[in-house]
Image (tube, helix red, strand yellow):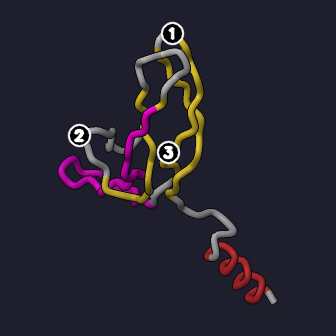
Amino acid sequence: MQLVVMAVVLALVGAGQGCSFSCHPTNISIPVESCGSTEYVSTTICEGKCYNEDPIFIFHDDWAEQKICNGDWSYEVKHINGCPVPVTYPVATNCECTACNAANTYCEPLP
């Protein structure tokens, strides 16, 4: 009986019912400002966790590759009423776990 219960629990976890890693787009509202006026716009960002291995022994020249939730981005333009200056804001078009790029992201393991 215990074996059957354990098999069911493992099947549910494997089906995404329990703890899982997921990198996906999510909708948020962000404030944008132009000509002294602030409005909120709806946009999409990448959100979630990616699987990473955390080695027991860390050597400075042999870091494990870190994965981050990132994606492709486009930019949209919003015109605020009464303001001739448009506001440009980012929109995530798709999200996936990719190798961390040290040129624009902190990739070191957290202490």
What residue is drawn where x is 53% and y is 15%? Answer: 82
Question: What SS does tag 3 mark?
Answer: strand
Q: Are marks 3 and 1 in contact (CB under 8 Å)?
A: no
Per the image, the residue denoted by label 3 is: 45
Residue, far right: 1
Per the image, the residue denoted by label 1 is: 36
| In this view, 17 is above or below 106 | below
| In this view, 47 is above or below 9 | above
Q: CA distance from mark 1 to mark 2?
A: 33 Å
Determine which quarter of the picture holds residue 90: top left
**Of residues 74 and 66, the one drawn nearer to the viewer in this rendering:** 74
Q: CA distance from mark 2 to mark 3?
A: 20 Å
**Of residues 46 and 54, the one drawn nearer to the viewer in this rendering:** 46
In the picture, the disc for residue 103 is 2
| In this view, 110 is above or below 59 | above
Q: CA distance from mark 3 to mark 1?
A: 25 Å
| In this view, 16 is above or below 73 | below
Residue type pointed to by label 1: Gly
Determine which quarter of the picture holds residue 89: top left
Residue, far top: 36
**CA neighbours of label 3 inside 10 A, class few (<14), some (14 to 19), many (20+):** many
Residue type pointed to by label 3: Ile
**Of residues 19 and 83, the one drawn nearer to the viewer in this rendering:** 83
Which of disc 1 and disc 3 is earlier in sequence? 1
Which of disc 2 and disc 1 is earlier in sequence? 1
Q: Which x, y percent locates residue 95?
A: 44, 56
